[in-house]
Amino acid sequence: MLRRLLAMVIPVFMLVGVVVLLVLAMQHFEQGQPAPVQNSEAQPRQPQYTLNTTEWTRFGDDGKPVFHITAQSIDYYPDQSAVLHDLTMDRLNQGDGPWHLSSPQGEMPAHEQRVRLDNPVTVTGQFRDGRELRMTTTELWVDHDKQQIYTDKPVTVIGAGGQHAQAVGMLARMDGENLQLQHDVRVDYVPAAKR
């Protein structure tokens, strides 16, 4: 009886031993192999949806427009960011702002109340006293919370009557009350002719 029992148990232990050895051998073999090669090229983000030939007006809590954007297309992503293509932006400062902005591309970062316009950015407008200007830069932020438009990039400002300024960085209020050139400012000013 003992022989019969041993005859049945020994093959089972041998089978278990073979399985354990195979598992250990496979683990050892996998550890010695190089990691699979990953595709080094980053996959482009895919929008959740795209809007074409779009007009977008954002309203504040008081029902007045915060901004108005016209864009050839807007790509909206799952993280709530958006990329805007061939855009113009105006009606800042609750519809009364003097600025008209244009850019081939812009981005609204996820969960933020601001929009970045990318190179080349053109700003046209006028101050409350009626003086007109044209400004160009490579990047411009429009920040609703701060009620400002600003950049830390080089900027060129051309005003009516021959005024011309260059600087690095600019800060302007959305209502057009002031515009500050920040650093390395150079101004060429032609005085008005006497009458």
Image: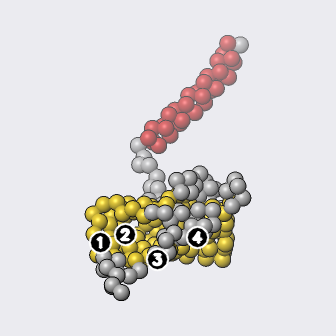
Quadrant (top left, top right, bottom left, bottom right) of the C terminus: bottom left
Work out whether 51 lies above or below 19: below
- Disc 1: CA contacts within 10 A as few (<14), some (14-19) or many (>=20): few
Q: Is residue 27 left or right of residue 66?
A: left
Q: Residue at x 54, y 70 (%)?
A: 98
Q: How far apart are marks 1 and 3 (CA)?
A: 16 Å
Q: Can residue 119 be seen in this view?
A: yes
Looking at marks 1 and 4 on the same chain, the residue that comes earlier in the sequence is marked by 4
| CB atoms of marks 1 and 3 within 8 Å | no
The residue that disc 3 covers is: 132
Looking at marks 1 and 3 on the same chain, the residue that comes earlier in the sequence is marked by 3
The residue closer to the viewer here, 17 or 72, is 72
Q: Distance between the residues labelled 3 and 2?
A: 16 Å
Q: Distance between the residues labelled 4 and 2?
A: 19 Å
Q: How far apart are marks 4 and 3 (CA)?
A: 16 Å
Query: For residue 60, which quarter of the picture?
Result: bottom right
Residue 90: assigned label: 4
Q: Which residue is drawn at 66% across and 63% down?
A: 65
Q: Can residue 120 be seen in this view?
A: no
- SS at mark 1 in the image: strand
Q: Distance between the residues labelled 2 and 1?
A: 12 Å
Residue type at tag 1:
Val
Residue type at tag 4:
Asp
The residue that disc 1 covers is: 187
The residue that disc 2 covers is: 155
Residue type at tag 2:
Val
Work out whether 124 lies above or below 46: below
Residue type at tag 3:
Glu
- SS at mark 2 in the image: strand
Residue 67: assigned label: none
